[in-house]
């Protein structure tokens, strides 16, 4: 079939297999161009490995460190009539490339929050890998079913305390409007912590440790966003921010356990960029469009793969000075949070309208990146070609 993007609001409902493969290859090429990362993992488990920061982590572990990788993800496989999801195609392309390089690359497509997927992971690790020396927790999900109670929780992208009104860009009509988001209730905050907090990360580590599947010196990290005043009302100080605080709590608890085997656990703070998860957060498309404009102009723009390659090389596996904050998180967001950058974001934000959107922001760049997530708009890919949507993992 000839596959063209079907965009509905903040999601694209199909994906291009050849485009996704090319997007993965671009990231592999970048990591290879940076050279080998010494002291990196040899066997890595990446939970949330198929898109965004998790995919970049899997690519860096494999092609930067030579690691065998087991990826856990939740993606839609293709049929003859419908394309699979982007993460499915990304995984197929990654696994084929890693195996070609002689690395073990296995995937589990299922709900990482469930006991079944944890058990399946343990059994696959025992059969094909042995103990892992890196566990990356990079899930972004709107809901979670707690396997111990059967209750399903939904996260809320809402402020805490008062309703918050801000500008936003409607990604369908390209209009800049004022949007008001009502505050989260106490229950919604608690549910958001249940979904995006650290409990499931702890359960993963406990399950792996209980089966002696964490190697001596094993490291673990989960990803967070902190931001500054511009994004605090809807992120840092919002319901999702409370969930991210809970990750800090979990990291400390996990660190205590990993220390016993000479390992370490830290939260890594990454910059804001376009992923399937961030495009769903009301303030993010406009904030990121403005941020890209400023950071591209001063030459400091980075995408997922640059952030994660840097995280592995200069932070997780650095032998020198690391950039830690007051509670021991690994910081990769310094360039975004510079006062000069945030002041410019504030200024452009205050002046932006539907009419000047493309002058005052890099909304075009945002849209291009967004489409790339689904394998569209990639140089060298023939989008008029008849391609089979069915690709094996
Ligand atoms: P993403 O949507 O690109 O990736 C989410 C991953 O989770 C995918 O691999 C998906 O398959 C997997 N997943 C979701 N639900 C699952 C489930 N139930 N079972 C198994 N797998 C599941 O998101 P992302 O932006 O890369 O986010 C990853 C992490 O990075 C999140 O914790 C996010 O908060 C954090 N982060 C993101 C940004 C940003 O700007 N995008 C910035 C800093 C931190």
Image (spheres, rainbow, N blue to C red):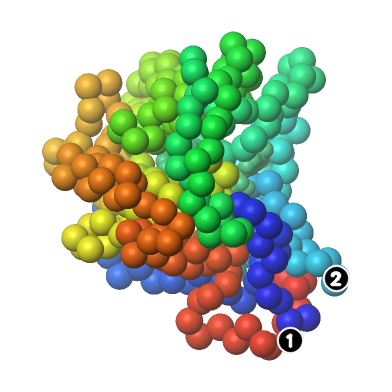
Could you say which is closer to the camera, residue 54 or residue 5?
5
Q: Is mark 2 on a helix, strand or loop?
A: loop
Q: Dot 1 surroundings within 10 Å: few (below 14), some, or many (20 or more)?
A: few
Q: 193 above or below 137?
A: above
Q: Where is residue 268 in the image (x, y as percent from the top left)?
A: 35, 36
Q: Position of residue 297 (x, y in %)?
A: 23, 63
Q: Is mark 1 on a helix, strand or loop?
A: loop
- Indicate yes or no: mark 1 CB to ligand 1 under 8 Å: no
Residue tagged 1: 386
Residue tagged 2: 81
- In the picture, the disc for residue 149 is none
Could you say which is closer to the camera, residue 374 or residue 318?
374
What residue sits 48% from the left and 81% below the top?
379
What residue sits 38% from the left and 35% below the top?
231
Q: Ligand 1: which quarter?
A: top right
Farthest residue, direction top: 186
- Residue at mark 1 to residue at mark 2: CA–CA distance: 13 Å
Could you say which is closer to the camera, residue 146 or residue 346?
346
Q: In which quarter of the image is the N terminus?
A: bottom right
Q: Dot 2 surroundings within 10 Å: few (below 14), some, or many (20 or more)?
A: few
Q: 215 above or below 77?
A: above
Q: 393 above or below 237?
A: below
Q: Mark 1 near mark 2, Cβ–Cβ under 8 Å?
A: no
Reading the chain from its start, which is encountered first: label 1 or label 2? Answer: 2
Q: Quadrant of the C terminus?
A: bottom right
Could you say which is closer to the camera, residue 9 or residue 65?
9
Q: 108 above or below 6?
A: above
Residue 72 appears left or right of 52: right
What residue sits 56% from the left and 83% below the top?
381
Q: Position of residue 26 (x, y in %)?
A: 43, 71
Residue 355 appears left or right of 72: left
Q: Where is residue 14 in the image (x, y as percent from the top left)?
A: 70, 64
């Amino acid at each position: 079939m000839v596959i063209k993007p079907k965009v509905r609001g903040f999601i694209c409902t199909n994906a291009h297999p050849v485009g996704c493969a090319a997007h993965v290859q671009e990231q592999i090429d970048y990591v290879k161009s940076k050279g080998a990362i010494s002291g990196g993992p040899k066997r890595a488990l990446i939970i949330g490995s198929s898109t965004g920061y998790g995919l970049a982590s899997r690519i860096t572990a494999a092609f930067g460190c030579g690691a065998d990788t087991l990826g856990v993800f939740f993606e839609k496989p293709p049929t003859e009539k419908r394309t699979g999801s982007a993460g499915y195609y990304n995984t197929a392309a990654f696994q084929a490339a890693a195996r070609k390089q002689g690395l073990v690359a296995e995937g589990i497509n299922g709900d990482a929050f469930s006991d079944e997927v944890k058990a399946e992971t343990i059994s696959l690790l025992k059969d094909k890998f042995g103990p892992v020396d890196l566990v990356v927790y990079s899930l972004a999900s709107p809901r979670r079913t707690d396997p111990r109670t059967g209750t399903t929780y939904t996260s809320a992208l809402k402020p805490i305390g008062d309703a918050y009104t801000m500008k936003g860009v409607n990604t369908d009509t390209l209009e800049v409007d004022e949007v008001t988001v009502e505050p989260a209730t106490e229950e919604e905050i608690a549910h958001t912590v249940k979904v995006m907090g650290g409990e499931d990360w702890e359960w993963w580590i406990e399950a792996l440790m209980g089966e002696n599947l964490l190697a001596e010196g094993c490291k673990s990290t989960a990803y967070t966003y902190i931001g500054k005043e511009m994004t605090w009302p809807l992120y840092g100080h919002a319901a999702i921010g409370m969930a991210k605080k809970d990750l800090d709590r979990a990291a400390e608890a996990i660190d205590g356990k990993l220390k016993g085997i000479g390992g370490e656990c830290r939260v890594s703070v990454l910059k804001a960029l376009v992923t399937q998860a961030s495009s769903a957060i009301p303030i993010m498309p406009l904030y990121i469009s403005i941020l890209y404009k400023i950071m591209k102009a001063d030459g400091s723009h980075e995408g997922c793969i640059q952030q994660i390659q840097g995280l592995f090389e200069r932070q997780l596996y650095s032998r020198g000075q690391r950039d830690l904050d007051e509670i021991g998180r690994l910081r990769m967001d310094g360039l975004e949070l510079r006062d000069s950058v945030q002041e410019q974001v504030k200024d452009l934000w205050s002046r932006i309208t539907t009419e000047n959107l493309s002058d005052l922001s890099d909304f075009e760049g945002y849209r291009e990146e967004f489409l790339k997530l689904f394998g569209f708009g990639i140089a060298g890919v023939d989008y008029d070609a008849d391609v089979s949507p069915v690709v094996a993992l």
